[in-house]
Image: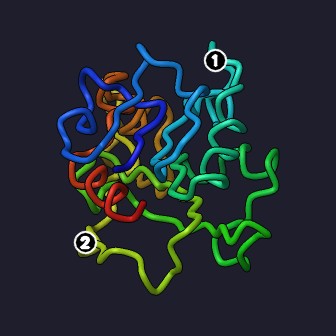
Amino acid sequence: MIAALYIDAKRGPYAAMPGVDAWGIERDATQYAGPWPVVAHPPCGHWGRYAHKCHDDGHTGPIAVRQVRQFGGVLEHPRDSKLWRECGLPLPGWLPDEFGGYTIEVFQRDWGHRADKPTWLYIVGCDRESLPPMPAPQPPRQAWTPSRRVLDPNRLESSRPRGARGIVECMSKNQRHLTPEGFAAWLVELA
């Protein structure tokens, strides 16, 4: 068994997976007390780039770190999450911490997400040599979509044009936060 914590049990893939005890919003994942390894997806808004738009206080992040350290498994958060600094988690490429935990970076596009979605995984209880096989890397997605205004065709820009929106900004909240089914299966296998 694996416990999937802080997930969307109604719309996400975990509740339908055999061998997974899904802890959605209806259950208080902060109360999970074992015994199984966990796949933890604590809300990231408070810890990310868009914290100024977030209404979450971030209290579940450090609790999820403690749960992964205690029971083993994996915690998933966006690249550069401030949760890493807050909890003293090792950055990608660093040596494991005192709990044997280490961090790798993956791109959810490799599992079929519409956006690149660079993601950090803090892993405890599975050494690097035992990670499940990863899918073939997919090419990066265009980082932005043009705005509705017409851009001057004679003007070449190497950076994001003014008024353009990022792929993630153009996606619905559900599209942004739901874990691709293949990625969820890989995380469960890892845990």
**Mark sitting on residue 111:** none
Q: CA distance from mark 1 to mark 2?
A: 33 Å
Q: Name the residue carrying label 1.
A: 56
Q: Name the residue carrying label 2.
A: 135
How many numbered callouts? 2
- Residue appearing at x 19%, y 45% in the figure: 18
Q: Position of residue 36 (x, y in %)?
A: 46, 49
- Residue appearing at x 56%, y 63% in the figure: 123
- The amino acid at mark 1 is Asp
Q: Quadrant of residue 54?
A: top right
Q: Quadrant of the C terminus?
A: bottom left
- The amino acid at mark 2 is Pro
Q: Is residue 132 left or right of residue 160?
A: left
- Residue appearing at x 23%, y 37% in the figure: 13
Please, what secondary structure does the residue beneath circle 2 have?
Answer: loop
Q: State the residue in front, 85 or 166.
A: 85
Q: State the residue in front, 154 or 146.
A: 146
Q: Position of residue 128 (x, y in %)?
A: 51, 81
Q: Quadrant of residue 178?
A: top left
